[in-house]
Image: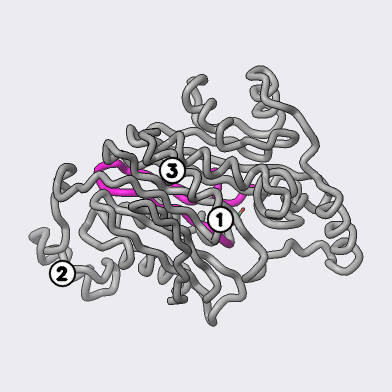
């Protein structure tokens, strides 16, 4: 069978995605690129995104700006899903996950790290100072000690008392509902037109010890291909991992979809496997090389921050 009729028959059989082969296009990396700096992040992290946006305007590279944004939320004790003040696992230990990816396709990640606040920066150090991509647990903490990262407890009094309350009633179910998450995923495009990103989280509140979600998994919580664009995820990590969501979005953009179409398709892939509208949330945010932005979520309530041309604004996202 010739390739075209083979693809056509797959398409008819519902085995091929619902876009035609005509939409596949060769990416021209220099095509219509305006290099105005862009900072985007999940949720309404106004200060974090403004910080990244200003750093880009001052000429910082996209990776540095992405990590600067993540750091603001890592230090924010009010954010119960990132860094210091993050909700602990069911045993009462706060463990953090993070990853970064740059415009050259380099990446680094740390998983289940205790006692270190700035895990996105630590992921960058894994990328730049080791021959590896991922470090986990004690190994990641030891690496941070070696690099003189401050070592400090991550469990705040508020997070501890919320956990103690949860233990009384929870029957050890992790909390995976629609509202209860605030992971920061950042995508930045710098003055050179290069795209990089970062993702940082404490994961699901009261997760099983050792549980890892999508956030530190390259391709799931974050993926960048500087010839195409980047994507980040927030929400129920297990569902993002099953569909390799951020990689999927970047590949769909490579094949001709806009960031908006690609985010919608990635959410559809999750919903296709559910019998009814699920009670968990997943949301995606994507940026392409030309500066187009897309976002989509399973439920209403998700929003993202956009810093562009000096303006930092929160943009609500409609559910699919
Ligand atoms: C996880 N995706 O660990 C993270 C949770 C999250 O906002 O996004 N919370 O599954």
Task: Check disc 1 and report the residue beneath it.
Answer: 45
Residue occupying the far top of the picture: 146
Quadrant of the rendering where the C terminus is positioned: bottom left
Task: Check disc 2 and report the residue beneath it.
Answer: 8
Residue occupying the far bottom of the picture: 276
Between 22 and 54, the one lying in front of the other is 54
Q: Is residue 226 magenta?
A: yes
Q: Is residue 227 magenta?
A: yes
Give how far across and how far down residue 186 sits, in percent: 47, 48
Relative to residue 74, is residue 306 depicted above or below?
below
Q: Mark 2 or mark 3: which is in front?
A: 3
Residue 217 visible in the shown view: no
Residue at figure coordinates x 51%, y 54% from the top left: 241
129 left or right, relative to 188: right
Between 49 and 187, the one lying in front of the other is 49
The 10 Å Cα crowd at callout 2, few under 14, some 14 to 19, many 20 or more, is some
Classify mark 2: helix, strand or loop: helix
Give how far across and how far down residue 102 sits, in percent: 39, 36
71 left or right, relative to 207: left
Between 267 and 14, the one lying in front of the other is 267
Residue at figure coordinates x 31%, y 61% from the top left: 259
- Image quarter of residue 252: bottom left
Relative to residue 116, is residue 212 depicted above or below?
below
Give how far across and how far down residue 37 sits, in percent: 33, 45
Mark 1 to mark 2 CA distance (whole Å): 45 Å
Task: Check disc 3 and report the residue beneath it.
Answer: 54
Q: Which residues are magenta?
A: 212-235
Queried on whether the Cβ of the residue with tag 2 lies below 8 angstroms from ligand 1, the answer reads: no
Q: Are marks 2 and 3 in contact (CB under 8 Å)?
A: no
Mark 1 to mark 3 CA distance (whole Å): 14 Å
Relative to residue 41, is residue 130 depicted above or below?
above
């Amino acid at each position: 069978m010739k390739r075209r009729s083979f693809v056509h028959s797959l398409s008819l059989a519902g085995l091929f995605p619902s876009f035609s082969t005509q939409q596949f296009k060769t990416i021209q990396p220099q095509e219509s690129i305006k290099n105005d700096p862009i900072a985007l992040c999940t949720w309404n992290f106004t200060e974090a995104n403004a910080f990244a946006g200003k750093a880009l305007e001052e000429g910082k590279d996209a990776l540095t700006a992405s990590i600067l944004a993540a750091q603001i939320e890592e230090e924010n004790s009010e954010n119960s899903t990132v860094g210091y003040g993050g909700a602990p696992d069911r045993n009462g230990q706060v463990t953090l996950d993070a990853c970064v990816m740059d415009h050259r396709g380099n990446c680094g990640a740390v998983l289940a790290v205790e006692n270190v606040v700035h895990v996105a920066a630590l992921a960058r150090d894994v990328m730049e100072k080791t021959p590896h991509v991922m470090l986990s647990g004690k190994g990641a903490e030891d690496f941070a000690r070696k690099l003189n990262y401050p070592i400090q407890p991550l469990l705040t009094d508020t997070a501890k008392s919320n956990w103690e309350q949860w233990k009384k009633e929870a029957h050890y179910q992790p909390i995976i509902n629609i509202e209860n998450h605030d992971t920061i995923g950042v995508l930045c495009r710098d003055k050179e037109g290069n795209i990089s990103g970062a993702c940082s989280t404490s994961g699901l509140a009261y997760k099983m010890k050792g549980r890892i979600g999508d956030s530190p998994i390259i391709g799931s919580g974050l993926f960048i291909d500087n010839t195409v664009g980047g994507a980040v995820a927030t929400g129920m990590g297990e569902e993002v991992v099953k569909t390799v969501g951020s990689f999927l979005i970047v590949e769909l953009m490579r094949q001709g979809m806009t960031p908006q179409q690609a985010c919608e398709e990635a959410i559809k892939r999750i919903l296709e496997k559910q019998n009814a509208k699920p009670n968990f949330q997943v949301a995606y945010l994507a940026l392409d090389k030309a500066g187009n932005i897309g976002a989509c979520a399973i439920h209403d309530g998700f929003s993202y921050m956009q810093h562009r041309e000096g303006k930092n604004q929160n943009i609500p996202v409609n559910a699919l």
